[in-house]
Image (cartoon, rainbow, N blue to C red):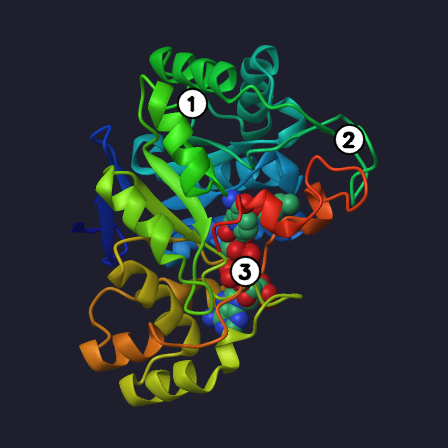
């Protein structure tokens, strides 16, 4: 259930309550592929846009820039306790002894004392220096329980407020739930009207795990152009909103937070104006019926080696669940 609060800018900002008791703001700024623009994007989002939630990852190579943006926003008067900062543990660090050093490096790059959320980025361990696509021996065994125990210790030591996972399947989430002492607060998954992934959403809801929808606009660059989808466009025109706003709102109306990426100041500010209106039921259902359901980020380039395995097909990565 969403809770409404107001930021200092007067922006009505909804948030969702996590199992841990912390709140996650319903809209966050994505920063993948923001590169050197990440600092400016973060400052625009936090100081002008009313955002309080930033999503980054070691793999994005922009944690230092994101950290500088957060620092500038704090100089402008924002308090650390009002922000929700997420980062992610990369695949080369998916062994128990590498978890804490990886987090410490992330905190250093971000110039922060703690994270609000630390996520396992993908449930596949890669050898350092792995090729894309992986060569034989690049994809290693992943000790999920050992890594999760270390994630739990980070939370117990208050270095991270919440821990969670990304890109999990029903099979993998059920396995983790079988041994977890700390249930993941958040599962971050690709979700937009072109890839609704209802099965994972239902499993997470059943276990009170909050879902964050990544690539809520379809990712655009090399992804799915939902901005120009005719159903999205028709609903946007009818509601006098932009396609980007309709897509973000769709995620929130499903009970997920959403983390649209933009490095364009106007679009950053546009994407968060989603709180004082609703998508009417009929239009919501039309978005829920967009055909040709397909992932944009299927992991093939990162983890599939067609001849050597251990994952020879995309279906192998997703445990043949789609
Ligand atoms: P999004 O779905 O957020 O789409 C971003 C693209 O849409 C960019 O090209 C952006 O261009 C454009 N855009 C942004 N706003 C608008 C708008 N209002 N109208 C038209 N175009 C717009 O894609 P991402 O794949 O980046 O996903 C969002 C975030 O989710 C990532 O940045 C990352 O933080 C996270 N993520 C997590 C993953 C995981 O494995 N856990 C995987 C993928 C993403 P411009 O910048 O020029 O505005
Ligand atoms: C390779 C990283 C995908 C975006 O999170």
Q: Position of residue 249 (x, y in %)?
A: 31, 66
What residue would you read off at disc 1? Answer: 114
> Which of the two discs, 1 and 3, sits closer to the camera?
3
**Residue 21 sits in which quadrant?**
top left
Residue drawn at x 79%, y 44% is 132
Label 1 – label 3 distance at C-alpha? 32 Å
Q: Which mark is residue 292?
A: none
Residue nearest the observer in this picture, 132 or 238: 132
Callout 3 touching callout 2 (CB < 8 Å): no
First-in-chain label (1 vs 3): 1
Label 3 – label 2 distance at C-alpha? 24 Å
Label 1 – label 2 distance at C-alpha? 31 Å
First-in-chain label (3 vs 2): 2
Q: Which mark is residue 295?
A: 3
Q: Which mark is residue 138?
A: 2
Question: SS of the residue at dot 2?
Answer: loop
Q: Position of residue 4 (x, y in %)?
A: 16, 52
Residue drawn at x 36%, y 62% is 272
């Amino acid at each position: 259930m969403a809770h409404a609060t107001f930021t200092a800018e007067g922006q009505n900002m909804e948030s969702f309550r996590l199992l841990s008791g912390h709140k996650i703001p319903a809209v966050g700024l994505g920063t993948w592929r923001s590169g050197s623009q990440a600092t400016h994007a973060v400052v625009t989002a936090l100081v002008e846009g009313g955002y309080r939630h930033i999503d980054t990852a070691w793999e994005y190579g922009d944690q230092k820039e994101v950290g500088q943006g957060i620092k500038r926003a704090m100089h402008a008067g924002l308090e650390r306790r009002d922000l929700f900062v997420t980062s992610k543990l990369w695949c080369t660090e998916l062994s128990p002894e590498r978890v804490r050093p990886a987090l410490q490096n992330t905190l250093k790059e971000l110039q922060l004392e703690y994270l609000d959320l630390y996520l396992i980025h993908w449930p596949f361990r890669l050898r350092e220096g792995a090729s894309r696509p992986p060569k034989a021996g690049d994809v290693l065994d992943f000790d999920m329980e050992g890594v999760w125990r270390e994630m739990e210790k980070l939370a117990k030591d208050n270095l991270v407020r919440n821990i969670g996972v990304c890109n999990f399947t029903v099979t993998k989430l059920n396995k983790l739930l079988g041994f977890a002492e700390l249930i993941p607060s958040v599962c971050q998954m690709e979700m937009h009207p072109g890839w609704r992934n209802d099965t994972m959403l239902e499993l997470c809801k059943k276990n009170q795990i909050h879902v964050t929808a990544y690539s809520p606009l379809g990712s655009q660059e090399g992804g799915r152009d939902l901005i120009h989808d005719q159903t999205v466009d028709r609903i946007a025109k009818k509601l006098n909103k932009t396609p980007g706003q309709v897509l973000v709102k769709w995620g929130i109306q499903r009970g997920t937070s959403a983390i649209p990426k933009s490095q364009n100041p106007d679009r950053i500010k546009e994407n968060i104006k989603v709180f004082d209106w609703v998508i009417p039921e009929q239009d919501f259902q039309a978005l829920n019926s967009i055909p040709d359901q397909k992932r944009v980020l299927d992991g093939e380039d990162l983890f599939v080696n067609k001849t050597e395995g251990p994952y020879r097909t995309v279906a192998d990565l997703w445990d043949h669940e789609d």
